[in-house]
Amino acid sequence: MNLRYNWTKEEIREIYDTPFIDLVYRAASVHREHHNPREVQVSSLLSIKTGGCPEDCAYCPQAARYHTDVEVEKLLPLSEVIKSAEKAKLGGASRFCMGAAWREVRDNSDFDRVLEMVEAVNALDMEVCCTLGMLTEDQAKRLAASGVYAYNHNLDTSEEHYGEIISTREYGDRLDTLKHVRKSGMTICSGGIIGMGESIDDRLGMLVTLTSFNPHPESVPINALVPVKGTPLADQPTVSIWEMVKMIATTRIVMPHSVVRLSAGRTNMSDEGQALCFMAGANSIFAGDKLLTTPNPDFNEDMELFKVLGLVPKKARKRETVKPEAV
């Protein structure tokens, strides 16, 4: 299957509307063509700076303007980050992602400390991922030089629906950061959230944007909204497993080389539902009892499920294998 960067929403909609069994079969076939179907990349996510974010992302309990149970905390000390990374590695994780509740990275002592954290985790032979908000081109280069393998910056939804979810930054700001990430040589981790009141067309519109990147994002997280009390989306209904599987299958077909991550919302999914997601092309998960501030299955549960399904954790790759791409 040839890689394409000019998918239209109508073409992707035709894939999405394929009868369920046929869609999963097609996605599984594409998955097996480009990936080892038994390997799943396991990531662990740590909030290194929690709460107090000035943004108004409607789904996020870390926004300072919402009344949630999340308390504002300072940047974690280096020793605690290393301890968490070592624990994650023992649990089977090959990638360690550090997230800070910032709108954007600032050139200050906190950023210098993050770079130290990156170097320390990199020394553990783990892939290092960061999600710190918007970046300048120079900041992206500094992160890459320190050993960051992947930078996460989700599009969240379609450009058309974006204004309903966030007003404190533009869709173009997200795209600019991703351009800086690509130019620096870091890999791109970018996906979105379903279940925020968006239409099917909005979900597929997000995929149109992601597939227009050349090369495609190396990692594409598909999150199911975890409604949190105190946020504007607190009363949203839970996304059905069928919608999740269809979204993962469609993503796998249009971005065959990308790692598709089954991300937030797994605590609401049965083992059987997750198995369908893996069959449909998901080959990455977040493991550990928290995703920043929301619940997540712990390592032991996931390893038990892997054993039942015959899956194995994928080994880490070093960032030196990534070459800078022209934008």
Image: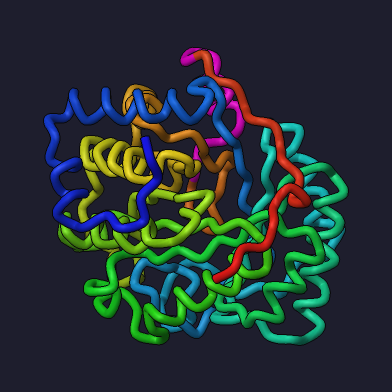
Residue 199 in picture, x, y percent from top left? 15, 60
In this orientation, which residue lies closer to the viewer: 234 or 160? 160
Quadrant location, the C terminus: bottom right
Please tell me in which quadrant of the rendered image residue 30 appears.
top left
In this orientation, which residue lies closer to the viewer: 47 or 216? 216
Q: What number of labels is visible?
A: 0
Question: Is residue 226 visible from the viewing direction of this image?
Answer: no
Q: Is residue 299 magenta?
A: yes
Left or right of residue 274, residue 95 in this image = right
Please tell me in which quadrant of the rendered image residue 29 appears.
top left
Q: Residue, x 63% and y 45% (percent of image)?
A: 44
Left or right of residue 271, residue 197 in this image = left
Q: Is residue 141 magenta?
A: no
In this orientation, which residue lies closer to the viewer: 304 or 321? 321
Quadrant location, the N terminus: top left
- Prevailing SS of the magenta stretch: helix
Question: Is residue 32 visible from the viewing direction of this image?
Answer: yes
Q: Residue, x 52% and y 13% (percent of image)?
A: 310
Read off the magenta span: 296-309
Q: Residue, x 62% and y 27% (percent of image)?
A: 313
Q: Residue pushed farthest front?
A: 2
Residue 182 in picture, x, y percent from top left? 59, 65
